[in-house]
Protein backbone atom coordinates (compact mmCIF):
# COMPACT_ATOMS: atom_id res chain seq x y z
CA UNK A 1 0.00 0.00 0.00
CA UNK A 2 1.31 3.40 -0.96
CA UNK A 3 1.72 6.07 1.77
CA UNK A 4 -0.66 8.99 1.37
CA UNK A 5 0.84 12.26 0.24
CA UNK A 6 -0.32 15.67 1.21
CA UNK A 7 0.22 18.79 -0.82
CA UNK A 8 3.01 21.21 -0.03
CA UNK A 9 0.37 23.84 0.81
CA UNK A 10 -1.11 21.56 3.45
CA UNK A 11 2.35 20.87 4.90
CA UNK A 12 3.15 24.58 5.13
CA UNK A 13 -0.21 25.43 6.70
CA UNK A 14 0.34 22.72 9.33
CA UNK A 15 3.82 24.09 10.13
CA UNK A 16 2.62 27.67 10.36
CA UNK A 17 -0.61 26.72 12.15
CA UNK A 18 -2.89 29.06 10.24
CA UNK A 19 -6.08 30.02 12.06
CA UNK A 20 -8.28 28.34 9.45
CA UNK A 21 -8.11 26.68 6.06
CA UNK A 22 -7.94 29.90 4.07
CA UNK A 23 -5.52 31.60 6.46
CA UNK A 24 -7.99 34.34 7.24
CA UNK A 25 -8.32 35.88 10.66
CA UNK A 26 -11.58 35.96 12.54
CA UNK A 27 -13.38 39.20 13.35
CA UNK A 28 -12.37 38.75 16.98
CA UNK A 29 -8.68 38.54 16.06
CA UNK A 30 -8.91 41.72 13.99
CA UNK A 31 -10.79 43.55 16.74
CA UNK A 32 -8.20 42.44 19.31
CA UNK A 33 -5.36 43.74 17.11
CA UNK A 34 -7.11 47.10 16.70
CA UNK A 35 -7.66 47.36 20.45
CA UNK A 36 -4.01 46.49 21.11
CA UNK A 37 -2.98 49.25 18.69
CA UNK A 38 -5.17 51.70 20.66
CA UNK A 39 -3.63 50.93 24.07
CA UNK A 40 -1.66 54.14 23.50
CA UNK A 41 -3.31 56.99 21.56
CA UNK A 42 -3.03 56.12 17.86
CA UNK A 43 -3.93 57.60 14.49
CA UNK A 44 -5.82 55.61 11.87
CA UNK A 45 -2.67 54.91 9.86
CA UNK A 46 -0.89 53.50 12.90
CA UNK A 47 -3.89 51.32 13.75
CA UNK A 48 -4.08 50.15 10.13
CA UNK A 49 -0.43 49.05 10.08
CA UNK A 50 -0.51 47.46 13.54
CA UNK A 51 -3.64 45.43 12.78
CA UNK A 52 -2.69 44.53 9.17
CA UNK A 53 -5.91 45.73 7.54
CA UNK A 54 -6.63 48.10 4.67
CA UNK A 55 -8.13 51.57 5.09
CA UNK A 56 -11.63 50.60 3.93
CA UNK A 57 -11.78 47.72 6.39
CA UNK A 58 -10.34 49.91 9.15
CA UNK A 59 -13.12 52.47 8.70
CA UNK A 60 -15.78 49.78 9.17
CA UNK A 61 -14.11 48.39 12.30
CA UNK A 62 -13.48 51.83 13.82
CA UNK A 63 -17.16 52.70 13.36
CA UNK A 64 -18.19 49.39 14.93
CA UNK A 65 -15.80 49.72 17.89
CA UNK A 66 -16.74 53.35 18.52
CA UNK A 67 -20.42 52.41 18.42
CA UNK A 68 -19.88 49.60 20.94
CA UNK A 69 -17.84 51.87 23.22
CA UNK A 70 -14.59 49.89 22.91
CA UNK A 71 -12.55 52.80 21.54
CA UNK A 72 -13.08 56.56 21.57
CA UNK A 73 -11.71 59.71 19.98
CA UNK A 74 -9.13 61.30 22.25
CA UNK A 75 -10.11 64.81 23.30
CA UNK A 76 -10.72 67.32 20.54
CA UNK A 77 -8.41 65.62 18.04
CA UNK A 78 -10.66 63.51 15.75
CA UNK A 79 -7.66 61.65 14.37
CA UNK A 80 -6.49 60.05 17.64
CA UNK A 81 -8.15 56.97 19.06
CA UNK A 82 -7.68 55.32 22.43
CA UNK A 83 -9.09 52.16 24.00
CA UNK A 84 -11.79 52.56 26.66
CA UNK A 85 -12.14 50.60 29.90
CA UNK A 86 -14.77 48.44 28.20
CA UNK A 87 -12.27 47.80 25.39
CA UNK A 88 -9.58 46.81 27.90
CA UNK A 89 -12.02 44.37 29.53
CA UNK A 90 -12.84 42.85 26.11
CA UNK A 91 -9.13 42.50 25.33
CA UNK A 92 -8.42 40.81 28.70
CA UNK A 93 -11.25 38.33 28.22
CA UNK A 94 -10.25 37.63 24.61
CA UNK A 95 -6.68 36.89 25.70
CA UNK A 96 -7.93 34.59 28.49
CA UNK A 97 -10.04 32.57 26.06
CA UNK A 98 -7.18 32.44 23.57
CA UNK A 99 -4.84 31.18 26.32
CA UNK A 100 -7.31 28.50 27.42
CA UNK A 101 -7.87 27.27 23.87
CA UNK A 102 -4.17 27.73 23.17
Image (cartoon, rainbow, N blue to C red):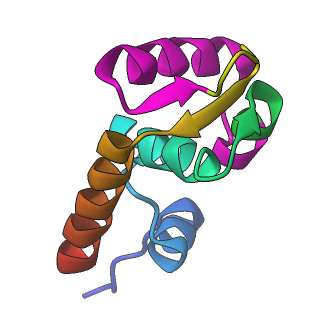
Q: Is residue 85 left or right of residue 1?
A: right
Q: Position of residue 23 (x, y in %)?
A: 49, 48
Between 76 and 66, which is closer to the camera in this rendering? 76
At 60% from the left and 44% from the top, the residue drawn is 38
Q: Is residue 50 left or right of residue 5?
A: right
At 71% from the left and 48% from the top, the residue drawn is 50
At 24% from the left and 88% from the top, the residue drawn is 1
Q: Residue furthest right?
A: 45
Relative to 20, is 100 above or below? Answer: below
Between 7 and 64, which is closer to the camera in this rendering? 64
Q: Look at the image and tell me whether residue 24 can be seen.
A: no
The span picked out in magenta is 49-73
Q: Position of residue 5 (x, y in %)?
A: 42, 75
* Marker count (numbered): 0
- Looking at the rendering, which quadrant does residue 25 occupy? top left
As for residue 83 lying within the magenta part, the answer is no
Q: Residue furthest front?
A: 75
Q: Position of residue 74 (x, y in %)?
A: 64, 28
- Looking at the rendering, which quadrant does residue 57 occupy? top right
Q: Is residue 40 left or right of residue 21?
A: right
As for residue 62 lying within the magenta part, the answer is yes
At 28% from the left and 53% from the top, the residue drawn is 89
Between 75 and 20, which is closer to the camera in this rendering? 75
Q: Look at the image and tell me whether residue 21 can be seen.
A: yes
Pick the quarter of the image with the C terminus. Answer: bottom left
Magenta residues, dominant SS class:
helix
Relative to 33, is 72 above or below? Answer: above
Relative to 28, is 65 above or below? Answer: above
Q: Position of residue 55 (x, y in %)?
A: 72, 18
Amino acid sequence: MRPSRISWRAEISMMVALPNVRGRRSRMEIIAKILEACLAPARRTHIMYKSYIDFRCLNRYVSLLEGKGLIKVLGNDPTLYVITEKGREFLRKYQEVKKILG
